[in-house]
Amino acid sequence: MTYDAHGKVQALALEQHGVFTADQATTLGVNKRSLVTMAARGHLERLAHGLYRDTRTPETRWTPYMRAVLWPYRTPAVLSHETVLALMELSDVNPSAIHISVPRLFRTKRTPPPGVIVHRQDLTEADIASVEGLPTTTAARAIRDCAMDNLGPALIRQALADAQQKGWVTTAEAEHLRHDLAAAGKLAA
C-alpha cells in the first residue's frame, strides 16, 4: 500500500460518510490489491463485496444510509419509502429499517445487510433527489410509495402537509398527489 493510495480512498470516504466501493477506488487509480492490503492492516473495513469503510474517517449519522445505497455494488440504489420521509422530516414516521430501491431487474445471491429492506422498482430521473449527498427518491415519490405500501393514512396526510410546508413539493404537486392517492383509497381515515 502506498500513502498516496490511502490518501485517495480517505478523501473519497470523507465525501461519502466514510464508505466507498472498490470500483470508485479503481477510478481514482487505486488497485484492488492495495485495498486488500489496507484492509489487512486495519485501515479499511470490508463491509460487503466491493464495499469498504475507511476506519480513520469518523462515522456520521449518515454512514449507515450511504452503506445501504452502495451495498448493491455496480447497481444504482437510492434511499426510498419511509426512510426518505424520515430523512426529510415528513410526518412522524419512524422506520425500523433503511429502505432502498434498486431496478426491478437487480438480482443478487447476497443477502442485504441487516436492517436494510430492498424494493425493486424502476425510477426515472424525475423520481431522484438528494439529501446530505445521499441519493434518495423525491418526497412525492416516497409519499406515493409509502401510501401504496399501506402506510397509515394519517401519516400520509401529515407527510403531504409537511412536504408542502417545507418546500419538498409544490402546491400543484401536493394537490395532484392528494387527488391520485384519494382515488386509490389511500387517504381514507
Image (tube, rainbow, N blue to C red):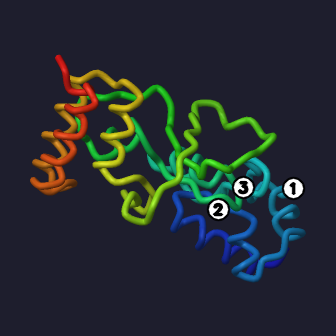
Answer above or below: position of 4 versus 106. Answer: below
**Residue at mark 3 to residue at mark 1: CA–CA distance:** 15 Å
Q: Position of residue 28 (x, y in %)?
A: 70, 81
Looking at the image, which residue is at 22% across and 37% down?
159
User: How far apart in space, not on screen, are marks 1 and 2 (Cα)?
Assistant: 17 Å
Q: Which residue lies at the image location 77% right of the left edge and 51% below the top edge?
A: 46
Q: Quadrant of the N terminus?
A: bottom right
Mark 2 lies on a secondary structure that is: strand
Residue 24's image quarter?
A: bottom right
Q: Are marks 3 and 2 in contact (CB under 8 Å)?
A: yes
Give the residue at x 52% y 58%: 17
- The answer to which of marks 3 and 1 sits earlier in the sequence is 1
The residue indicated by pointer 3 is 51
Viewer-proximal residue among 80 and 148: 148
Q: What type is the residue that disc 1 sits on? A: Ala
Query: Of the numbered discs in the image, which one, if any, rests on residue 20?
Result: 2
Q: Which residue is mark 1?
A: 40
- Residue 115 higher or lower than 103, as above or below: above
Could you tell me residue 186's position as x and y percent?
Answer: 26, 27
Question: Sequence order check: which comes first, mark 3 or mark 2?
Answer: 2
- Give whichever of 145, 179 is nearer the camera: 179
Seen from the viewer's position, the closer of residues 178 and 92 is: 178
Q: Is residue 102 left or right of residue 51?
A: left
